[in-house]
């Protein structure tokens, strides 16, 4: 829908003449927002309907309180002005927001700022359809994050992939850490990201957000691949918060209940797409950046734990910790302080330690692990069975969980050697009173087998892929509603 701002009848006729294309692209009509109409909204509408019958469909959008009308407040249609925001009338702006009132409110503020070419949609799907019908990218999309059907992040991914807009701004009531995550993702997909706007929307905030827009000739398409980078790129990426935690659910084999998530880092690198941790963790360890990375991930994770708890989902979160981090004797205090600062409890966090070939001072490592445990963190042996001295580690440190590596889970129904290793691992875990998690569960057959062998928790594509943190509550609901119990029985 196109929204026209009308202050006087005589301007309306000429404006409508200028918008035949809009009518062509938007068969659902041209919305007329009438404000400060002499005689009030209804008489204005009647006049419009009578006068314009047949040429456009007229829909009242909203009435602007007349007491706010005044020079400088409303740039007015077709008016030019020195103020940069008045140039907004040249840009097509789409507002995607499921909440009717909020959407109208946003459109109204945009009109206040002089925007004339406006489109609106109540959800991502509707927006994508409008954009596809339009054929040419819009200039700016203002998008809510929390929407039914298709959430804002998925919508923005489609927008980026289809080059459907030049710039986006997120308008949302979610926490700032979540906003940052989404912004970083949108940037990595090659979108121009304007400052995000909090709710309730203010004219001033909207204005400063939109004034950051830089129109470009072509929107660059970005693919998700691995590229060359150096230590400086990693350092800058950390500073710019380009490393984002995704979360993969862990569920009970017995009941299907969602018990926790594992945080898995992704690098949303502007202009390069999304880079897998497999490409950069080693490099980060090598240049001494893996501890700041862990701290960044832990902070994001705690932010989400709090947000999920508010929605009634009290779960644990696992964070991977490299052995390199354990070389720092102060790490236990630092991680503990960090978790406390966010208002979370270390009991909600499980640190997953993978054995590596790194030669280190074993006594020091055991000391650090023991201190982490004392402070309440759970400790998990990651990739069990693939390391170098698993058994020795297990008996010396009070681990709380054992993760069976996905390489053994894979093909376990067909491979008896894999089954033997799993059986032995589960046996050992039982004796040491460790919880057991099978990672990389991809098929129903693997699920059934691991469950029959007495493994307690499952993680893998069969249950869910790693996903952005804000999607976790919806996923949990969906999982609970559809077949959680089927799968567990
Ligand atoms: P990991 O800790 O063993 O994590 C499991 C990996 O398996 C993840 O890959 C996950 O996306 C993938 N995966 C999950 N389900 C399945 C499945 O059903 N099938 C298969 N084939 N794969 C599955 P991702 O995210 O690429 O992470 C790779 C490794 O990078 C992780 O292995 C972990 O060792 C490391 N890593 C990830 N995030 C961090 C981090 O924040 N800090 C540190 N130090 N290491 C991290
Ligand atoms: Ca792990
Ligand atoms: Ca693994």
Image: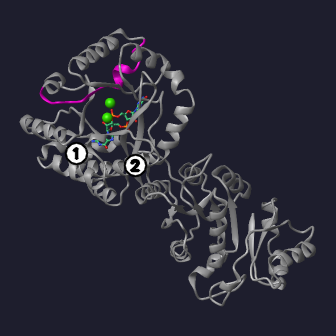
Give the camera-side residue of 233 and 177: 177
> Dot 1, crowdedness within 10 Å: few (<14), some or many (≥20)?
some
Give the camera-side residue of 216 and 453: 453
Choose the circle earlier in sequence order: 1 or 2: 1
In this picture, is 348 found above or below 292?
A: above
Q: Which residues are magenta?
A: 396-413
- Residue at image x 42%, y 21%? 254
> Dot 2, crowdedness within 10 Å: few (<14), some or many (≥20)?
many
Residue 347 included in the magenta stretch of the image: no
The residue beneath circle 2 is 304
Label 2: which secondary element: helix
The residue beneath circle 1 is 285
- Residue at image x 55%, y 26%? 483
Label 1: which secondary element: helix
In this picture, is 353 found above or below 101?
A: above
In this picture, is 235 found above or below 442?
A: below
């Amino acid at each position: 829908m196109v929204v026209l701002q009308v202050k006087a009848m005589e301007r309306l006729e000429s404006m409508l003449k200028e918008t035949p294309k809009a009518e062509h692209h938007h068969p659902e009509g041209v919305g007329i927002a009438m404000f400060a109409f002499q005689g009030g909204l209804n008489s204005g509408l009647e006049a419009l309907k009578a006068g314009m019958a047949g040429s456009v469909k007229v829909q009242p959008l909203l009435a602007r309180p007349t007491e706010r009308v005044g020079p400088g407040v409303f740039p007015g249609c077709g008016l030019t002005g020195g103020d940069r925001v008045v140039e907004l009338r040249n840009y097509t702006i789409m507002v995607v927001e499921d909440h009717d009132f909020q959407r109208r409110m946003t459109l109204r503020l945009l009109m206040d700022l002089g925007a004339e070419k406006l489109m609106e949609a109540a959800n991502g799907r509707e927006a994508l359809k409008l954009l596809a019908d339009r054929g040419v990218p819009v200039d700016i999309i203002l998008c809510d994050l929390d929407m039914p059907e298709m959430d804002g992040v998925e919508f923005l991914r489609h927008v980026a992939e289809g080059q459907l807009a030049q710039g986006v701004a997120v308008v949302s009531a979610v926490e700032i850490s979540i906003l940052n995550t989404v912004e970083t993702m949108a940037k990595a997909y090659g979108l121009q990201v304007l400052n995000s706007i909090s709710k309730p929307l203010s004219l001033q905030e909207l204005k400063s957000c939109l004034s950051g827009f830089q129109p470009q000739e072509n929107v660059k398409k970005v693919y998700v691949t691995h590229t060359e980078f150096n230590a400086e790129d990693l350092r800058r990426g950390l500073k710019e918060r380009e490393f984002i935690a995704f979360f993969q659910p862990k569920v009970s084999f017995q009941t299907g209940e969602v018990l926790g998530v594992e945080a898995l880092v992704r690098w949303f690198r502007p202009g390069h797409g999304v880079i897998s941790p497999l490409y950069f963790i080693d490099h980060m360890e090598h240049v001494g950046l893996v501890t700041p990375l862990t701290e960044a991930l832990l902070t994001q994770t705690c932010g989400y734990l709090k947000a999920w708890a508010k929605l009634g989902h009290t779960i644990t979160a696992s964070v991977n910790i490299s052995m390199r981090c354990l070389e720092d004797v102060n790490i236990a205090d630092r991680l503990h302080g960090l978790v406390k600062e966010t208002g979370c409890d270390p009991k909600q966090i499980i640190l997953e330690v993978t054995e590596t070939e790194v030669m280190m001072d074993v006594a020091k490592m055991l000391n650090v692990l023991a201190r982490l445990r004392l402070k309440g963190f759970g400790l998990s042996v990651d990739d069990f069975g693939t390391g170098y001295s698993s058994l020795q580690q297990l008996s010396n440190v009070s681990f709380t969980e054992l993760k069976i590596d996905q390489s053994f889970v894979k093909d376990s129904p067909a491979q008896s050697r894999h089954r033997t290793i799993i059986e032995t691992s589960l046996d050992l875990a039982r004796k040491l009173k460790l919880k057991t998690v099978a990672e990389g569960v991809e098929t129903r057959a693997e699920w059934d087998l691991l469950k029959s062998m007495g493994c307690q928790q499952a993680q893998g594509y069969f249950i869910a892929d790693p996903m952005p943190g804000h999607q976790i509550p919806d996923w949990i609901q969906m999982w609970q509603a559809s077949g959680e119990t089927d799968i567990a029985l």
